Amino acid sequence: MSKKILLEKHKDVARIDQESKRTHGWYVRVRFLGKTHSKFFSDKKNGGRYSSLLSALAWRDKKEKELGKQRTDRHLVTVSNTSTGVVGVRLNEKLGRYEVSWVNKDGKQGKTSVSVAKHGKKKAFERACEIRKKKEAIRLAA
């Protein structure tokens, strides 16, 4: 690896430079199944800025493997804030539909909806989940 790695963005790794507390290093946060695992890699203790970044990346990758989390630099949403319990699928009772949202491979938001009146609540939910699953598969295959 070359030193240009310092200029790249790394998922779940943030640079901390706090002069007032003489704190310089990399902070790693791995989130999986509702839990956060974090560790700070000091430049001083790890032999400099470059070495501490390499240590941070190695720890992140090892922790993800240990937890069973798939290693990817793409943003994955694994927690649903909707009452349906399915990421990207929500029931809009006011409009009588399930709304489906996703992010395409270019990073743009996509949306569609499935009518409860037309398909019934159960079928509409199943169709919405299937749409979401297909859109995510397309994005992750890219």
Image (cartoon, rainbow, N blue to C red):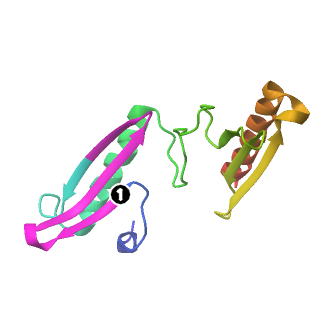
Q: Is residue 3 above or below residue 65?
A: below
Under mark 1, the amino acid is: Val
Q: Over which residues does the magenta segment extend?
A: 13-38
In front of the other: 33 or 8: 33
| Location of residue 98 in the rendering, given as x and y in whole percent from the top left corner | 75, 39
Instruction: Say whether residue 43 is magenta.
Output: no
The reply, left or right, for residue 94 in relation to residue 83 is right
In front of the other: 140 or 33: 33
The residue most toward the front is 94
| Location of residue 128 in the rendering, given as x and y in whole percent from the top left corner | 77, 38
| Location of residue 55 in the rendering, given as x and y in whole percent from the top left corner | 27, 54
Q: Residue at x 72, y 39 (%)?
A: 133
In front of the other: 104 or 66: 104
Instruction: Say whether residue 24 is magenta.
Output: yes
Quarter of the image with the N terminus in it: bottom left
In front of the other: 108 or 42: 108
The residue most toward the right is 118
Mark 1 lies on residue: 13
The quarter holding residue 17 reads: bottom left
| Location of residue 34 in the rendering, given as x and y in whole percent from the top left corner | 41, 35
Q: Main secondary structure of the magenta part?
A: strand
The quarter holding residue 49 reads: bottom left
The quarter holding residue 122 reads: top right
The residue most toward the top is 122
Q: Residue at x 35, y 57 (%)?
A: 13
The residue most toward the left is 21
Q: Dot 1: what SS? A: strand
- Say few, some or many: other residues with alpha carbon within 10 Å of mark 1 (under 14 / 14 to 19 / 20 or more): some
Q: Is residue 14 above or below residue 101?
A: below
Q: Residue at x 73, y 35 (%)?
A: 129
Quarter of the image with the C terminus in it: bottom right
